[in-house]
C-alpha cells in the first residue's frame, strides 16, 4: 500500500476497494487526538477501478455511484483529494457529515459547505471557494481547510444528494 506523505506526516493507508493492494480510492486519516493513525474503510457502490493520479482510483458514472462509510467522533480541519471531472454537472466529491461537504458547481467552482471560513486550494493555488474552479478532463488537486474543526459523521465519496462523473483518488482527512 502507498503510505503517502503530507497532511502532517506519514500515515496508515486504507484501501476502500477492499484492501487488495491498491485497487481504488485511498483514505489516510490523521487523527488530532492521538499519535496513531486509523483507516477508514468504505463500501463502494457502482464505482469501477481505473488508473488514478497515484496507482488506481475510483470512477464515478453518476447515479448512485458512491463510497460510503461511518466515522468515529474525532474532528478534522481539512479535506484533500485528487479529482478528474468529466462533465460539468453539480459534483459532490466528499461528504464529511450530513452538513459538511466539498462539492463543485455547474461551472466547476468549489463549494465548501459547513466549514467555518474555509480556505480553498486548487492545484496549490489559494482562492475564494465560490470562484476557484477546476479544469475539466484533467487531474486537479483540491484542499479545503478551516481553523474551526468539524465533526465527521456519515462519510461519502462521490455522492451526497447528487452524484459526480469522473475519478477521485487519494482522499485525505
Image (cartoon, rainbow, N blue to C red):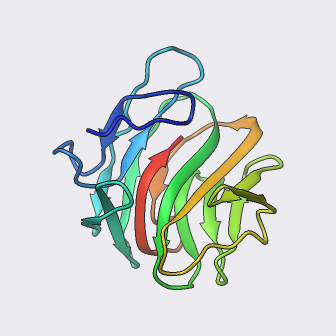
Residue placed at 56% from the left, 35% from the top?
A: 7
Identity of the residue furthest to the top in this view: 35
The spot of residue 130 in percent (x, y) is: 78, 69
**Could you say which quadrant of the image residue 66 lies in?**
bottom left
The spot of residue 27 in percent (x, y) is: 41, 43
**Could you say which quadrant of the image residue 140 lies in?**
bottom right
The spot of residue 109 in percent (x, y) is: 69, 73
Residue placed at 38% from the left, 38% from the top?
A: 40
Judge left or right: residue 160 versus residue 48: right
Judge left or right: residue 160 versus residue 119: left
Image: 76 above or below 85: above
**Could you say which quadrant of the image residue 39 lies in?**
top left
The spot of residue 91 in percent (x, y) is: 55, 73
Tally of numbered tags: 0
Image: 85 above or below 128: below
Judge left or right: residue 114 versus residue 49: right
Amino acid at each position: 500500500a502507498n503510505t503517502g506523505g503530507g497532511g502532517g506526516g506519514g500515515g496508515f493507508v486504507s484501501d476502500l476497494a477492499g484492501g487488495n493492494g491498491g485497487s481504488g480510492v485511498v483514505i489516510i486519516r490523521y487523527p488530532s487526538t492521538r499519535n496513531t493513525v486509523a483507516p477508514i474503510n468504505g463500501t463502494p457502490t457502482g464505482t469501477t477501478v481505473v488508473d488514478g493520479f497515484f496507482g488506481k482510483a475510483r470512477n464515478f458514472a453518476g447515479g448512485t455511484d458512491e463510497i460510503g462509510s461511518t466515522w468515529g467522533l474525532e474532528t478534522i480541519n481539512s479535506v484533500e483529494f485528487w479529482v478528474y471531472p468529466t462533465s460539468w454537472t453539480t459534483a459532490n466529491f466528499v461528504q464529511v457529515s450530513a452538513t459538511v461537504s466539498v462539492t463543485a458547481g455547474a461551472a466547476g467552482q468549489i463549494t465548501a459547505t459547513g466549514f467555518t471560513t474555509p480556505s480553498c486550494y486548487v492545484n496549490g493555488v489559494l482562492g475564494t471557494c465560490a470562484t476557484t474552479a477546476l479544469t475539466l478532463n484533467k487531474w486537479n488537486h483540491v484542499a479545503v481547510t478551516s481553523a474551526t474543526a468539524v465533526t465527521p459523521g456519515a462519510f461519502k465519496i462521490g455522492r451526497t444528494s447528487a452524484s459526480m462523473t469522473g475519478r477521485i483518488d487519494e482522499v485525505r482527512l
